[in-house]
Image (cartoon, grey):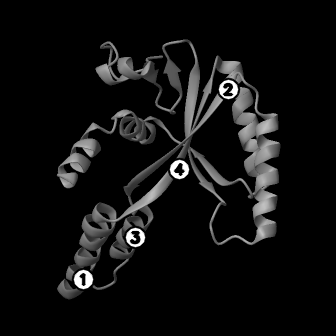
Amino acid sequence: MSTHRGQDPPTDFYSIVGIDGIDEDGLIHFSDGGEGQVYLVVGSASYLLFDEDRVGILDRVDSFWRKVETACEHSFITTKEPQRVYHQVANLERRNQTLQVRDPDLIELQNEQYDILTQHVGGKFTSIHQYLLLKGKNADALRKGHQVLQAEVGGSTLMIKEATVLDREEALPMLRLFYQGIDDELLDLEASLN
């Protein structure tokens, strides 16, 4: 089983961040022998919560961290990314395929909707995305980390409403975004201050 594309050595990106490779299913192999997995997570926190909801969430978070073993690191990563429009584009495509009449005006209208979704909503508008990187010291530690997380997601929606495992194609762009640094942002900030 190859842990990276092709038979070439890992890319510079992998070596800089201590990653030996990423399997197709998203399993990350770290240089120190650890294994990891990235989840897209949706939580419950909001400024609009009632006090009793806040207390319930804090109690649940405290309970979760008491169950976490030290052999598996949990790193929450928050990013600002373009809005995801996959589902809307898929629905638009299904609607296009089921059109009974292929009227040019209807086709043009659907093309406009597609452009709005992909070019504007998915291109110019950003939203906050939160990820959880589990990194176990070994495969068994990662397995136990998965179990604690799955138990939390299945047992309550107070801390984490949803956790979706990312495969390699989904995890790699997030890791690149996370590890790219902030040099460009600092340069933009310095330019705006001058």
Q: Is residue 25 above or below residue 91?
A: above
Q: Is residue 55 visible?
A: yes
Q: What is the C-alpha distance between the residues marked 2 and 1?
A: 51 Å
Q: In the image, which disc is placed on residue 94?
A: 3
Lower sequence index among marks 3 and 2: 2
Q: What is the C-alpha distance between the residues marked 3 and 1?
A: 15 Å
Residue drawn at point x = 44 percent, y = 49 percent: 79
Say whether residue 135 is left or right of residue 29: right
Q: Nearer the viewer, mark 4 or mark 1?
A: 4
What's the amino acid at mark 3? Arg
Q: What is the C-alpha distance between the residues marked 2 and 4?
A: 19 Å
Lower sequence index among marks 2 and 4: 2
Q: Which residue is mark 2?
A: 72
The spot of residue 186 in percent (x, y) is 27, 43
What's the amino acid at mark 1? Leu
What's the amino acid at mark 4? Gln
Q: Which residue is mark 4?
A: 130
Q: What is the C-alpha distance between the residues marked 4 and 3?
A: 29 Å
Q: Nearer the viewer, mark 4 or mark 3?
A: 4
Q: Is residue 167 above or below residue 96?
A: above
What's the amino acid at mark 2? Cys
- Pick whichever, 9 or 2, lies toward us: 9
Q: Nearer the viewer, mark 3 or mark 1?
A: 1
Lower sequence index among marks 4 and 3: 3
Q: Nearer the viewer, mark 2 or mark 1?
A: 2
Q: Which residue is mark 1?
A: 109
Tag 1 secondary structure: helix
The spot of residue 189 in percent (x, y) is 26, 49
